Image (cartoon, helix red, strand yellow):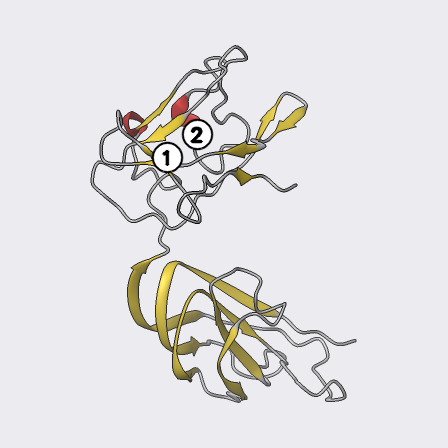
């Protein structure tokens, strides 16, 4: 029976990766790193769908407790993935019931200051920075409008015909994306079907996001 284990690291922002260093405590059978592939990508599962960039060719660290994979060129990405028994030859004999052990991954590179999360998950953005046009009830306040709050989350009242949710970042920022999550409402799961994005330095004079210029960008939730 063959196995091809993998390990995935989320850097939380876009990093220009130069090298990946693997630290191991156990270095031999049954903990074997045979032909490990190292990848850098901007999306989580790109290494499974051949969308990730390979840092270096497959290499066997053998009994080395510290092993460096040097990228052939700097690669910008958010996710680092390491796969064991990464063969390009389908007829190659892979490992039987080997364990894949990594004690520490060290990424050598530099931050691009892009792609990082801004604090709605971590709490670095405080509740007073979040407002909404209305709320369904006390269990769906604006300060619950954060990712990973599926049991509550923010929800507008049923008679709110033009609901909005606003985040005050305090200082000007360059935004690169918006991520939404549905909520559980009793036995039901609810999602936003579509929405517009507005931005600006003055909340009383916001601009609707257009893409391309001149065309209002309507974002749809694809289920």
Residue plotted at (74% across, 85% down): 90
Label 1 residue SS: strand
Point out the image quarter for the N terminus: bottom right
* Residue 151, image x, y percentages: 55, 28
Judge depth for marks 1 and 2 and give the one in front: 1
Front in this rendered view, residue 47 or 93: 47
Q: Earlier in the sequence, mark 1 or mark 2?
A: 2
Q: In which quarter of the image is residue 150?
A: top right
Q: Is residue 218 left or right of residue 188?
A: left
Marking on residue 145: 2
Where in the figure is residue 2, as x and y percent of width and height?
Answer: 75, 76
User: Which quadrant does the C terminus fall into?
Assistant: top right
Alpha-carbon neighbours of circle 1 within 10 Å: few (<14), some, or many (≥20)? some
Residue found 29% across the figure and 29% down from its top: 129
Q: Where is residue 19 in the image (x, y as percent from the top left)?
A: 38, 79
* 87, above or below 116, in the image: below
Q: Which mark is residue 198?
A: 1
């Amino acid at each position: 029976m063959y196995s091809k284990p993998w390990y995935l690291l989320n850097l939380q922002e876009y990093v220009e990766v130069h090298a990946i260093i693997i630290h191991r405590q156990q270095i031999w059978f049954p903990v074997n790193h045979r032909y490990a592939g190292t990848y850098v990508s901007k999306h989580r599962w790109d290494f499974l769908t051949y969308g990730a960039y390979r840092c270096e060719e497959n290499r066997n660290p053998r009994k080395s407790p510290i092993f460096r994979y040097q990228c052939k060129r700097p690669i910008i990405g958010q996710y680092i993935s390491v796969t064991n028994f990464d063969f390009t030859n389908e007829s190659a004999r892979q490992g039987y019931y080997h364990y894949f052990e990594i004690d520490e991954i060290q990424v050598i590179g530099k931050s691009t200051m892009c792609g990082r999360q801004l604090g709605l998950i971590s709490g670095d953005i405080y509740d007073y920075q979040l407002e909404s046009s209305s709320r369904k009830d006390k269990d769906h306040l604006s300060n619950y409008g954060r990712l990973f709050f599926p049991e509550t989350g923010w929800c507008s009242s049923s008679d709110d015909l033009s609901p909005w949710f606003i985040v005050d970042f305090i200082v000007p920022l360059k935004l690169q994306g918006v991520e939404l999550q549905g909520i559980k409402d009793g036995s039901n799961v609810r999602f936003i079907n579509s929405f517009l994005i507005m931005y600006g330095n003055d909340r009383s004079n916001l601009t609707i996001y257009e893409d391309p210029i001149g065309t209002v960008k309507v974002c749809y939730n694809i289920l």
